[in-house]
């Protein structure tokens, strides 16, 4: 249970960094500074993103295996961008104000999320 909560917090931190650095990614409560509502929404989005990464990502990687081999794994970045875009759509369906304005912001956001997640995972031992 502790590992799941830690993973959600790491995802929330990485999503917050993506919101801060990428112009096309926004969250309703975090545009004018951090508020308690914004942190709650960020944790909800991080949970949705974590569920998609745990369930949908392995299935999509298996289905796109030939494309993964052809691009030497770089298609994973495209899959991650699509998962972030899907996360924004599902979050909006639940009434959480998280928006990704296109595939380029989604792609840049996943790059930032990946880097922040790797750094935080390296700093926090299991």
Image (tube, rainbow, N blue to C red):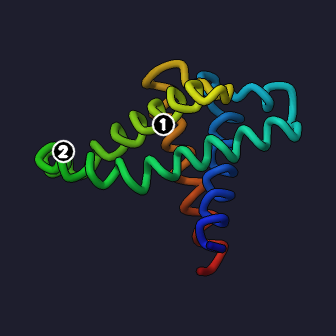
For this rendering, which residue is in front, 39 or 66?
39
Which label is found at residue 64?
2
- In-front residue for pair 95/26: 95
Q: Callout 1: few (<14), some (14-19), or many (20+) C-alpha neighbours within 10 Å?
A: many
Figure quadrant of the C terminus = bottom right
Q: Name the residue under label 1.
A: 84
Q: Residue at x 51, y 31 (%)?
A: 90
- Report the side of 66 relative to 118 (left or right): left
Number of on-image labels? 2
Q: Which residue lies furthest to the front in this view?
A: 94
Q: Mark 1 or 2 closer to N-term? A: 2
Locate residue 104, reporting x and y percent: 46, 25
Q: Where is residue 20 in the image (x, y as percent from the top left)?
A: 71, 35
Q: Where is residue 113 in the image (x, y as percent from the top left)?
A: 56, 47
Residue located 20% across and 52% down the image: 62
Label 2: which secondary element? loop
Q: Which residue is drawn at 54% across and 37% down?
A: 109
Location of residue 34 in the rendering, given as x and y in whole percent from the top left corner: 86, 37
Disc 1 on helix, strand or loop? helix
Q: How far apart are marks 1 and 2 (CA)?
A: 17 Å
Furthest residue toward bottom = 126
Where, quadrant-wise, is the N terminus in this rendering?
Answer: bottom right
């Amino acid at each position: 249970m502790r590992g799941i909560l830690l993973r959600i917090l790491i995802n929330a931190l990485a999503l917050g960094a993506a919101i801060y650095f990428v112009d096309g990614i926004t969250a309703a409560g975090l545009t004018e500074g951090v508020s308690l509502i914004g942190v709650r929404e960020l944790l909800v989005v991080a949970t949705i993103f974590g569920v998609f990464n745990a369930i949908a990502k392995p299935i999509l990687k298996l289905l796109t295996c030939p494309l993964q081999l052809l691009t030497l794994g770089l298609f994973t970045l495209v899959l991650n961008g699509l998962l972030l875009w899907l996360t924004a759509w599902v979050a909006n369906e639940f009434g959480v104000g998280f928006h990704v304005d296109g595939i380029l912001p989604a792609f840049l956001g996943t790059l930032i999320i990946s880097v922040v997640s790797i750094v935080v995972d390296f700093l926090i031992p299991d």
